[in-house]
Image (tube, grey):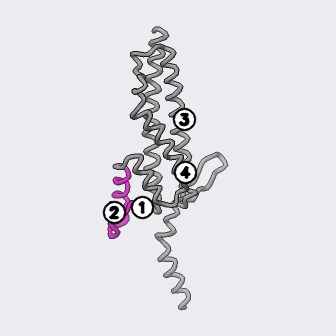
Amino acid sequence: MSELDVARFLYFQEMAATYLSVGKFESMLISAMHMCDRVKVQKALGLDEDAWALSVAKKSQLEGSTLGSLIKILERHNVDPADIAYLRWIKDKRDYFIHRLFHDHAWPGEMDAESCQFMRRRLLAIQLWLERGERKIWRIFERAGFIELDHLEDGGLLVMNSGIYDLIQADITKLGSEGADA
């Protein structure tokens, strides 16, 4: 294989990896929003559904939304404007890859080895930004009060849905008032 063939092959490889990074980021955001009871999608869901049906409907609604729509949902909640701006910045990088990459005439078959190398570096940068965005989702949700994080020594995280408190608050109140009557 020539140097040009290798450059084009590697470029195709980075395009595929970037596409996977886009999917992973969007999937992580949907999963995080789905598990947080404090993130509501009220327009699509009725209040009288049972918990399982509500969860399935919420996940379906989130999966059917665009990345821009997901960010708008978060914007209507207690998410810091700087965090919303960060998510929009990530979306801009994703949009460049999905919608505008080839407007720059980045067709591998028409590029020389140097141009392929340049575009590979650009794709690697987009992948890194998306992967960083995946990790930051949890801290953004922690700051918004959607979840509680327990930071483990090995760098891992335990995530707890803060909305669970909202769900059991009525039961706690009822138990407290029954104890006062005794």
- Label 2 crowd bin: few (<14), some (14–19), many (20+), radius 10 Å: some
First in residue order: circle 2 vs circle 3? 2
The residue under label 3 is: 128
Q: Is residue 61 magenta?
A: yes
- Please report the residue visible at 32 percent of the width from the left and 66 percent of the height from the top: 46
For disc 3, the neighbor class at 10 Å (few under 14, some 14 to 19, many from 20) is few
x then y, percent, for residue 29: 46, 48
The amino acid type found where label 4 is placed reads: Asp
Q: Amino acid at mark 3?
A: Leu
Residue receiving disc 4: 83
- Which SS class for mark 2? loop
State the mark number for residue 45. Answer: 2
Picture layout, residue 86 above or below residue 20:
below
Q: Residue visible at 49% across and 10% down? A: 3
For the record, the magenta segment spans: 41-62
173 lies left or right of 102: right
The answer to the question of whether label 1 and label 2 lie on touching residues, with beta carbons closer than 8 A, is: yes
